[in-house]
Amino acid sequence: MTDSREHARWFRVFHPSPDHARPLVCFPHAGGAAGYYHRLSAALAPAVRVTGVQYPGRQDRLGEPAATDVTALADTVAALLARRPGPPPVLFGHSMGALIAFEVAARLEHRHGRTPAGLVVSGMSAPHRCAAGVRELADDTAAAEELLRLGGTDPEILADAEVRALVLSVLRSDYRAVRGYRPGSVPARLSCPLAAFTGLDDELDADAVRAWSGHTTASFSLRGFPGGHFYLDGFPPAVTGAVREAVLGMTGAAPAAGSAAGRG
């Protein structure tokens, strides 16, 4: 399969942007899809070009089996990004997406010689601290309870039996991928700036989030936002402003006036 066809399978660009736009590649959470970042793209365009990564097994890739290996996903995405023209992107990942984004960043730097401009991780403990906090979803009932507990899904979606089965199947596959994840297949320290975002009411251990600082030799920052695990749902202005500030700062541009401030 040609690169252009593979890119079409894996990447979604939601809004037009000029050639000089700052590239931001976004990785969805467990059970999520590229479309989660459509609103962020609308808020940041045209200065920032948002690309959402579309994992197999959801939306227009529904006919493909969902992946159950974080590092295998990272291998594929990193190889594709390494062949894309243009300046190095900032990578952003939420929850499971944070782990995939980190592994992609490591591969880009240490395997492909294409160090990303920066990495923003959200809603996830540092790689060596994450697996212990991930629940095992033994069946669809447990998966549905987990979705409702985290607050990232409209309960009405789960009322439709067919949709419920599709959503929960993907979620369980993604959770297996995170539970089976172990860092270390490539060097775990990056040379690009790293920022960690977290919901102030999330159940994540604060020290486990701060431990991301050990995965870069460059600058590290930590920002907290009101809300729980899905504090970023709908991308409110404070979150959008923080993402914009991170992207512009990591790509060498001065942050826009009035960018949101965070804690940390």
Image: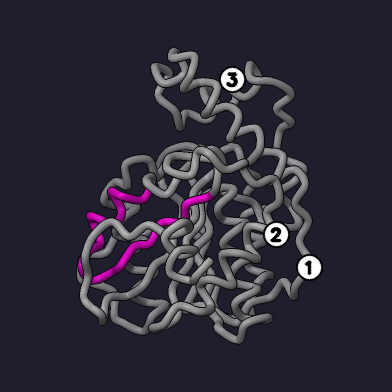
Q: Depth check: give the residue in front, 200 or 110.
A: 110
The answer to whether residue 53 is magenta is yes
Q: Depth check: give the residue in front, 71 or 221.
A: 71
Of pointers 3 and 2, the one earlier in the residue sequence: 2
Give how far apart the Cα atoms at labels 1 and 3 are.
33 Å
Give how far apart the Cα atoms at labels 1 and 2 are.
8 Å
Q: Is residue 220 above or below residue 87?
A: above
Way the structure is coloured: one colour
x then y, percent, for residue 17: 22, 70
Q: Is residue 77 above or below residue 197?
A: below
Identify which amino acid the numbered label 2 is placed on. Thr
Q: Which residue is mark 2?
A: 71
Residue at point 21% right, 65% down? 16
Of pointers 1 and 2, the one earlier in the residue sequence: 2
Magenta-tinted stretch: 37-55
Q: Which residue is mark 1?
A: 185
Identify which amino acid the numbered label 1 is placed on. Ser
The answer to whether the residue labelled 1 contacts the one labelled 2, judged by CB atoms less than 8 Å apart, is yes
Residue at point 65% right, 66% down? 75
Mark 1 or mark 3, whichever is nearer to me: 1
Residue at point 23% right, 56% down? 43
At mark 2, the secondary structure is helix
Q: Which residue is mark 3?
A: 145
The answer to whether the residue labelled 1 contacts the one labelled 3, judged by CB atoms less than 8 Å apart, is no
